[in-house]
Amino acid sequence: MTKFSELNLNPKVLKAVEDSGYETPTPIQEGAIPPALEGRDVLGIAQTGTGKTASFVLPMITQLARGRARARMPRSLVLCPTRELAAQVAENFENYAKYVKLTKALLIGGVSFKEQDQLIDRGVDVLIATPGRLLDHFERGKLLLTGVQIMVVDEADRMLDMGFIPDIERIFGLVPFTRQTLFFSATMAPEIERITNTFLSNPARVEVARQATASATIEQALVMLKPSRRDRASTEKRDLLRALIDSEGEACSNAIIFCNRKTDVDIVAKSLKKHGYNAEPIHGDLDQSRRMEVLQGFRDGTIRFLCASDVAARGLDIPNVSHVFNFDVPSHAEDYIHRIGRTGRAGRSGKTFMICEPRDEKNLDAVQRLIEGTIPRVASPLSRDHDAPAEDSPPSAPEAEAAPAEKKPASRSRSRGRKPAEDSPAPTPAPAPAPEAEAREEKPSNRARSSGRGGSSRGKGDDKSVVGMGDHLPGFIAQSFEDRRN
């Protein structure tokens, strides 16, 4: 097995690595460091949590140990998709370069331009930046990139997801053509492959695992949730999350809970704190100082549950995360790999749960196609509770049978827009005729006489005998009636 001492690294860098407690490089480090030290372009593809950061930091420090930077002209450039990842790379640089006299600058949003300008003016060997802030400094005339010897693009697939590819292409045009390029990603989308073919020259391709695979040390589980009612879906989902946390007991020492939307991150964190859980949110709308404070609290154990958007899913190295909960099925299948990669790092074991509603099954299918496998399903801890009717749900069948029978016709009559019968459900008989009507029974109505229908089609048809037509009946007609009777 190869050791760091066999990789031709600077002795001062090796000493810093030993101080950090590492002796044996990971596969990506073993494959990427030798060609990087030779000055070749490197294309590194490895799943998250395999040590990609050290794969470019260690050879970069070794090569930069000779020479000195000039004002506003950094000698190397590291591009990261998020502020947190850039800050983590800067921390790695400080740890591994503590015995080497190199300077660095971190250019990220949420920090004063003035402080960053002062660092650049003094000259920096390593410039670590997010694409947007780097271009801001360049457009203000505070930065020249013509002295860059080594350029690193970290988490390239996340750059693609966040829409940074046009910025990356522009930055490539600002650095010298003779630079060395180190390109690292967990997945290799067609757009990223196009960029590598355009800007990398005969790179050493180092692929230590099949693209879009999760670490074998991670135990995955899927919980299906079918809400009892649509308006209670969010509440029942948060109930299920707390039940999953409780079911893990002491094994869940800490956890990252991922949501698709920033608003849900805040809501879930607030709900957990309301129920007594030590939780804090982190997402892109928070101030940078607050984001760093929350991350540090999660690292040192003062915060147990970190509710995060995908800003925390890429590249963050927090080695002792025991669990990852996907409160939402990620919209982009690749994000699932990066989310669960926050646990089970550096050979440790980890466990992940993902909550899936019926509306999420399309995204779930995309995730399972990407990982080329089926995520094992487990029973919901709240399955029995969700079988019981809610307090304001309709009554059960026995209760409905016990309801008074006379209410049923009333409900039918209301549904038809009629007034319900109060005395009896039977049809009401026709009222008895008034005395005046009885007196006129022998006479035909004027309407029947004028229409010539004799009233038979409008009557009930019970009496089929001829009814008199009135006192003014002509004699010849009366005679004809008498003849018929005889």
Image: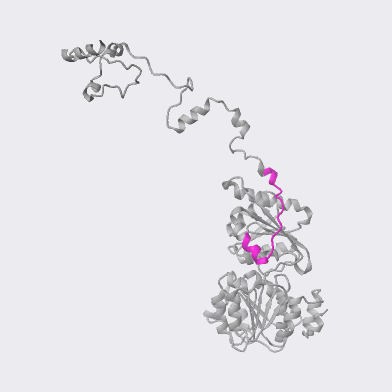
Taking the magenta stretch, the answer to whether it contains residue 133 is no
The front one of 61 and 243 is: 243
Residue 57 x, y percent position in the rendering: 71, 79
Q: Quadrant of residue 27?
A: bottom right
Q: Is the C terminus in the top left, top right, bottom left or bottom right quadrant?
A: top left
Q: Residue at x 76, y 58 (%)?
A: 253
- Examine the rendered structure and indicate whether residue 183 appears above or below residue 458: below
Q: Is residue 114 visible?
A: no
Q: Is residue 327 above or below residue 468?
A: below
Magenta range is: 364-385
The colour mode here is one colour
Q: Residue at x 22, y 12 (%)?
A: 483
Query: Horizontal and vertical percent for residue 327?
Result: 65, 56
From the viewer's side, name the closer residue of 184 and 425.
425
Position of the N terminus by quadrant: bottom right
Does the magenta portion include 377? yes
Q: Quadrant of residue 374?
A: bottom right
